DNA sequence: CGCGTAATTATGCAAGTGTATAATTTCTCC
DNA sequence: GGAGAAATTATACACTTGCATAATTACGCG
């Protein structure tokens, strides 16, 4: 009955921070920001709670770090697939596909988005991160649409491009949302199919037909 | 320095419950479900915390009641406008308009949606309410699209109707989301305009032109 | 008018919260 | 292999939380 002190292993600051951030994201997705307690996070990361204070000056800072980590990962996942691809149309298609397949479409991703929303609206730093990420998404989508329209010989004025980008972004967001909220309501590939068709219908571009190099 | 007991007025059970529910929705929108404390809600409703226990057997029950109240209000707001209208096309247009104007499009409505999501995913009763509301929305939209297509002499098979409803629902959801998240990013009426155009593009229906009775 | 009952307030409690600080252990470097 | 420093654990504290229960007050009804 010797209650010994817990053994531990020293890790690099980066590894520990990352582990803490991942544990934080898990718990935020499950229980919301307030439900992700310091003790719970420490337990999930297999560490005692004091260590969190050693790497993050407060829970607030840990939450902000976790949010930025998550947002960066989401943008990477969305844009990585079609970055290299050839025609603008192919890149637009890759963008739609990447946005509407796991792990972007995922109950956990949606839960994280919802859990963070409150803090995003109130905390200036998180608000900044959010607006930057959102603007990046939409600008990129608008550029893709502009290039694809130009490629098809039907360039559009700026005002029209803006509307098309908003509309396409909305379909993608909406499908992303529904796919995350009701994971079993859609067949494999159904979201991608609907997303492609909708973007095609809105922009007047044919996303299916293969390009002739 | 006589610390007197607080004066109060007796209210009907309905009025008190409603007041408590409204205060709850305010705080849930501002601080999330866990941030909406019993004491905070009581204060917002200008009442002491013990009274909450008198009308609701637990905070959980109050939260569930507030959620159902909110969802009912949202459906009423969305469907009330165009319920009576004439042609299917006009009713579809009214649905789009109602879904994309305040108070449906509103930062507070979005915040509520996000705040409740966690509980909706976990609590069976709230999940049931959510799925019922969602199904009601989409079925209604699908019926509107079906009627409008028939009206235009181009009926569609069931599978196609399902896809159109999912796509249109997604645009509307996405625009609703963006309008609530970035209230200042869109001009007056811009969301409605984009929503109408997108639904028109997806379904192939012209929503703008007036019907000839 | 006064009595009873239910609405409302007041108080208390145990559990959980973030954070601060002290005690210990692991590991690097000579 | 041992000393010093940093990583990690352990403990404590003040505060908040939901809930329970007792004390009071307002108001309808005779």
Image (spheres, coloured by chain):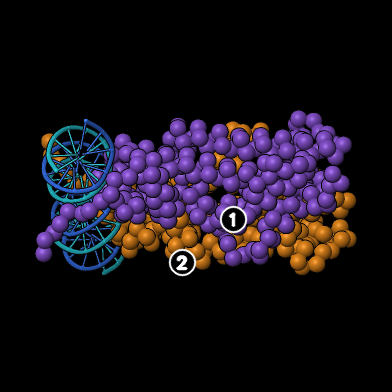
Chain colours: A orange, B purple, C cyan, D blue
- Can residue B170 be seen in this snapshot? no
Q: What percent of the width, then of the height, locates residue B110?
A: 53, 52
Of the pair B63 and C3, the residue shown nearer to us: C3
- Which element carries disc 2, helix, strand or loop? helix
Q: Residue at x 48, y 60 (%)?
A: A121
Subunit that carries the residue with mark 1? B
Q: Is residue B4 left or right of residue A196?
A: left
Q: Residues within 10 Å of mark 1 (few under 14, many from 20)?
A: some
Pick whichever, D30 or A211, lies toward us.
D30
Residue A124, placed above or below residue B51: below
Q: Picture coordinates of residue B112 (x, y %)?
A: 48, 49
The residue lying at 38 percent from left, 44 percent from top is B15
In 3D space, how far apart are the residues under numbered discs 2 and 1 (Cα atoms)? Answer: 28 Å
The x and y percentages for residue B90 are: 76, 45
Residue B102, label in figure? 1
B160 with respect to A28 (left or right): right
| Nearer to us: label 2 or label 1 | 1
Mark 2, residue position: A125
Image: D23 above or below B188: above
Image position of A30 (left or right of A43): right
Q: Chain of mark 2?
A: A
């Amino acid at each position: 009955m010797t209650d010994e002190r817990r053994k531990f292993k020293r890790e690099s600051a980066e590894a520990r921070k990352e582990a803490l951030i991942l544990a934080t994201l898990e718990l935020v997705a499950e229980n919301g920001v307030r439900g992700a307690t310091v003790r719970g996070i420490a337990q999930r990361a297999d560490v005692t709670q004091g260590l969190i204070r050693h790497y993050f000056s407060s829970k607030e800072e840990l939450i902000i770090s976790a949010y930025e980590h998550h947002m960066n990962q989401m943008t990477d996942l969305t844009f990585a697939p079609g970055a290299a691809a050839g025609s603008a149309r192919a890149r637009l298609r890759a963008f739609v596909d990447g946005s509407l397949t796991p792990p972007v479409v995922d109950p956990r991703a949606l839960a994280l988005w919802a859990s963070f929303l409150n803090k995003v609206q109130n905390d200036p730093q998180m608000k900044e991160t959010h607006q930057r990420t959102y603007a990046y998404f939409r600008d990129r989508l608008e550029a893709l649409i502009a290039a694809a329209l130009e490629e098809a010989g039907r360039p559009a004025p700026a005002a029209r491009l803006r509307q098309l980008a908003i509309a396409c972004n909305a379909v993608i967001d909406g499908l992303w949302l529904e796919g995350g909220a009701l994971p079993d309501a859609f067949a494999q590939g159904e979201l991608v199919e609907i997303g492609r068709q909708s973007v095609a219908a809105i922009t007047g571009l044919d996303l299916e037909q293969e390009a002739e190099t």
